[in-house]
Amino acid sequence: MMNRRRPAIIREGFITMDIPRSSPYSLSTLDQKKTSGGPRIPVAPEAPPVPRRQSSDRRLRPDRRKRQAEFKGEDRRKRSSRRSPSLLHHRSAAPVAAEDRRGKLLDTSA
């Protein structure tokens, strides 16, 4: 049979506990404070810190790729212009304006 604790009953300012007659403890032992907390774990001596292993996850390691050296000087790349796209003729590779090529291959003689 399980030992169930019954709640304290407060009557006229006094707290009374409902103690069953089948309890193996006397009233004097129930009124005393528990001084011993049971078996205690002995305090361990100061231990050295655990050595940390290097992470094998490549996402956590620093990047080993070569960084590109910063270029100091004038930028000689051709600047792209969206206002005047230069199209090349398919045979001569000469620059052709985009608006001139429209409808060039259509047969309008009908």
Image (tube, rainbow, N blue to C red):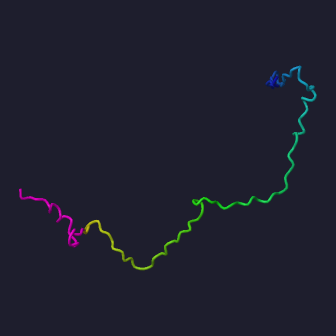
Q: Main secondary structure of the magenta part?
A: loop
Q: Is residue 93 above or below residue 10?
A: below
Residue 96 sits inside the magenta stretch: yes
Q: Which residues are magenta?
A: 87-110
Residue 17 within the magenta-colored segment of the rendering? no
Query: Would you say 98 lies left or right of 64 here?
Result: left
Farthest residue toward the front? 91
The residue shown at (57%, 59%) is 59
Residue farthest along the bottom direction in this orientation: 73
Depicted 11 relative to depicted 46: above or below: above
Query: Could you say where residue 44 lies in the image, as x and y percent from the top left?
Result: 84, 53
Judge by depth and name the residue closer to the eye, 6 or 106.
106
Residue 97 lies, in percent from the top left, at 20, 68
Picture layout, residue 37 above or below residue 52: above
Residue 18 falls in image quadrant: top right
Q: Tell me which residue sits at (15%, 60%) in the image.
A: 103
Residue 9: x and y, percent? 80, 23
Query: In which quadrant of the rendered view does residue 33 lie?
Result: top right
Q: Quadrant of residue 16?
A: top right
